[in-house]
Image (cartoon, grey):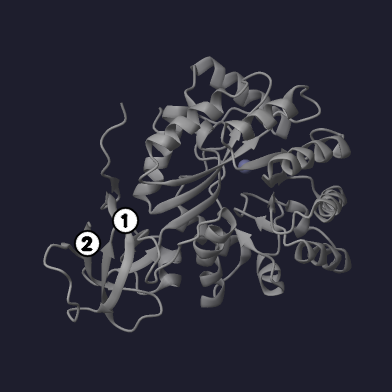
Amino acid sequence: MTRLLLQRVRVPGQAGACDLLVEDGRIARIESAGASSAPVDAVRLEGDGALALPGLVDAHAHLDKTLWGQPWHPHAAGPTLMDKITHEREELARRGHSSERASARILRHGLARGTTHWRTHVDVGPDIGLAHLHGVLAMREAHRDVADVQIVAFPQTGVMRAPGTLALLEQAVRDGTEVLGGLDPMGIDHDPRGQLDGLFGIAERHGSELDIHLHDRGDLGAVTVEMIAERCAALGLHGRVVLSHAFCLGMLEAARLEAIVELLLRHDIAVMSHAPSGPTPFPPLKLLHERGVRLCTGSDGVRDTWSPLNNGDMLERAYLLAYRSGWREDAGLELALHMATHAGAQVVGAPRYGLQVGCDADLVLVDAECGPEAVVMHPPRRLVLKRGRVVARDGRCVLSAIG
Ligand SMILES: [Zn+2]
């Protein structure tokens, strides 16, 4: 049995400094600092009174497409969604992009910033086939002991407008993805019935969850949510669907929003928001949380051809959620942290998540007095443990170099 004693850390909800005993990757004991009777063979690590947070959860990433670790890429894509999709395809092809290497680089960077769980959308389409997926699957296998990665097969170039995509998505599920992605059934495909019936059909055949990118605004987005809810009801997919972005929820008049919230609750549809940049509308997160809608957040694209405005730090992401939402009180800052930790873990299905006895020892130490201060300052990460193994120290990943 491997044992580790993390000495003198502060754990939210616990008075004073604590010692955490980790046995075989799980938290075995939490005791007042100095009072523990840890076995003599335990490796001791000094926490110096730092705040322990559970490992951060990036519930919406695009690990396969990042340019992280490569020379600075000045933004060059046009303004529309289709401009960005087309530009990305051309740029990645020109570079001979490797999704396996790219995803390994950004995953290790995330580990250094305290992220221990990911849900990543991976591009699947007729032009690239399953190449990105197989690259990310190989990366995931190589990092299985240091990161939990859930994969979404993502039709970035559309479903109905790119014939052959549905068959590729179904093959992706057979090859190991847990979640099926979708993309603006109206705005991109102009065929909401075709895309949604296709996706829900695959989900029904394979028991997959669904996570659908929905950028369509206003009523176009709201009608799409209604169509998704109808299919959840028909197929009994309660609690198995996530709406990513759902910009439309930030644009609806009160009565329409209320009707949509009722649908989200009835079918337990979760909402992911990363607090988009600029004037882009986004969901009223506090209202949704108070009504009981499950929420999560994610990095989305990190330094890719879509935008350079992101560094993949999930504590900074929590800060941006609070900043764009105008949250100043601790309750709002705590909600932002909750979305980047426990709430995200619930959405991505991490069963032993948290800082309690019996949970996986996935945690990050920061110099902060409390969770709200950690969000506002998003300070350097002193130590990151994944299932009790030190994966990063002082902001650097300590795993051996990528080959
Ligand atoms: Zn996305």
Which of disc 2 and disc 1 is earlier in sequence? 2
* Element at label 1: strand
Badge 2 is on which residue?
4
- Seen at 61% across and 55% down, the residue is 275
- Seen at 76% across and 39% down, the residue is 199
Residue 367: horizontal and vertical position, in percent?
Answer: 30, 66
Tags 1 and 2 in contact by the CB under 8 Å rule? yes
* Res. 68 in view: no
Picture layout, residue 238 above or below residue 19: above
Quadrant containing ligand 1 reads top right
Amino acid carrying label 1: it is Leu
Residue 125: horizontal and vertical position, in percent?
Answer: 67, 25
Quarter location, residue 262 = bottom right
Picture layout, residue 260 above or below residue 306: below
Residue 168: horizontal and vertical position, in percent?
Answer: 68, 26
Badge 1 is on which residue?
385
- On the picture, is 199 further left or further right than 271? right
The quarter of the picture where the C terminus appears is top left
Quarter location, residue 191 = top right
The quarter of the picture where the N terminus appears is bottom left
Q: Depth check: 179 or 287 in front?
A: 179
- On the picture, is 79 further left or further right than 46? right
Q: Residue furthest left?
A: 40
- The residue carrying mark 1 has its beta carbon less than 8 Å from ligand 1: no
Question: How far separated are the C-alphas under marks 1 and 2?
Answer: 11 Å
Amino acid carrying label 2: it is Leu
Residue 358: horizontal and vertical position, in percent?
Answer: 38, 68
- Seen at 81% across and 29% down, the residue is 160
Which numbered mark, 1 or 2, is in the foreground of this view?
Answer: 2
* Element at label 2: strand
Q: Please tell me how crowded label 2 is: few (under 14), some (14-19), or many (20+) other residues with Cα within 10 Å.
A: many
* Res. 314 in view: yes
